Amino acid sequence: MLNTFATILVVVMLLAPSIYAQQKNVAIGWDLTYKSVLERNNVAKTEWIWPWLAQYKTPAEKWLAGWKGEPIVSSMLIEHPAFHAAEHTTMWLIRTEDEAFYWESVAGSKNIGYEEPIAPTVYDAFYKEASAWQQFRPKRASALKTGALTGYMGFLSVYGPDGSRQMLLTMDDFSVCLDKSCTPGKSVKPGRLIAALVPILIPESERNYKHKSEPEIAAMTPEQRIDEEIKERDHMSRIGDRQYGLILKYRRKDGLKGHAHLIKLIESYDPKRLRNHTYSAAVMIALDIDDRTVRLRGSPEGRKIIEAIERLSSRMKMAGEKYITPDEMDLPKLNGLNFVDHAIADTLWMKYRIQVSDSELLEFSNFLVSRDPTYPSWSEQDFIRDYSRPAGPSQFHVMRDPKRYHEMYVTFKKLANNK
């Protein structure tokens, strides 16, 4: 439960005097209940924004009280409902003399807020534009698409050299419908708030990313190909994207080359960083290596990658991560049966009518790892449908060239029977 405003003031008073003086001004300048803002604009109690506001207490109170950085020169606070399920979304932008930061929290996602450093020049450009805005009037229901929400959609609070002010946000601040149909991608354009936030929310390197040609990808180092795959993930248009597949082709040839760089990326996890999804993408690359190239547990380099993922999982749990952590989904595959193992079992059934239990499959997998951990790369796979398996799935991935797997299984069975 967040502290009340009165309690927060007590906490703030315990901070260093220079910080307290700064935070006192910010707290006094903003009404974080927003009641005065709504009443000043004569927003009727029947408007949906009143009950929405009553459902959740802003984390901004706690953020302001807990700020331990340099004195704040200027700041902007944006609070609004997420537009798919109305979760309370809070964005706080802070400018000190030398630095700038972006904090974000979405109700129900995490107990902590994200903290992201941003370029001071990027913050300054946003502040200069947004601090000069005048409040829009919301459109009438007759001008909106049938069923669209009417009224105000959020709040913008500004603090700076000229003091503090607060204003209401309308849907046009987020997206502008060019006609009454408001068809996504056709008659909708970003509102002034979203357009102004783009340089903050989407780094320049991502906005200006361009696909690399095959000769460029082929000339990269293994480390560069790992980075390129992560960049391409943000631009992949669909499953089976041709450009992404091109990068995969070369990166899979690298095997465990670049493993130290991959470990570094896995260990880059920071629970307070909004934009850092690199660690997650690095884990996905590790899984792909394990599934398609070489079993990680079969080499010292691969085991170091698994250990890095184990450390990541522990750190995510300690941070209170509510989403799936690697030990819930990924580590069991790396240390046991993965995608290729199940494809081998399906192949043995489809091609030779050999039924393999999960316990036997694990023993066979360990046998293959001990003999040749590169067994995932022995054959490409085909996706097929078959309804002959009793009480089993009807869709399978099977090995295009099953002979070697079958020969190894025969050897495995002979050794097991001779024990």
Image: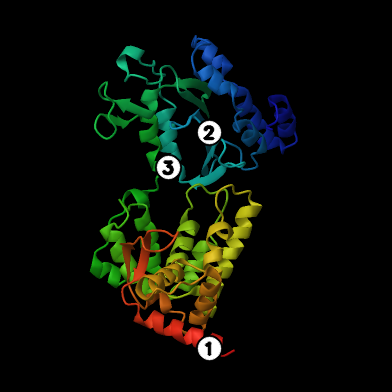
Please name whichever residue, 344 or 380, is drawn nearer the observer in this view of the structure.
344
**Where residue 239 appears, x then y in whole percent?**
32, 55
Q: Tell me if residue 382 can be seen.
A: yes
Q: Is residue 384 left or right of residue 292?
A: left
Q: Tell me if residue 301 can be seen.
A: no
Do labels 3 and 1 touch, CB within 8 Å? no
Task: Identify the amino acid type marked 2.
Answer: Thr
Task: Identify the amino acid type marked 1.
Answer: Leu
Task: Identify the amino acid type marked 3.
Answer: Leu
In the image, is residue 396 above or below residue 101? below
What is the secondary structure assignment of the residue under circle 1? helix
**Where residue 388 appears, x then y in whole percent?**
37, 63
Query: If you read the primary sequence from the N terminus, does the residue marked by circle 2 or circle 1 appear first?
Result: 2
In the image, is residue 69 above or below residue 169? below
Per the image, the residue denoted by label 2 is 90
* Residue at 55% over, 19% down: 51
Label 2 packing within 10 angstroms: few (<14), some (14-19), many (20+): many
Q: Is residue 332 left or right of residue 132?
A: right
Please name whichever residue, 228 or 37, is drawn nearer the observer in this view of the structure.
228
- Residue 201 image label: 3
Per the image, the residue denoted by label 1 is 415
User: Within the image, what quadrant is residue 127 found in?
Assistant: top left
Mark 3 vs mark 1, foreground winner is 1
**Where residue 100 appears, x then y in whole percent?**
51, 42
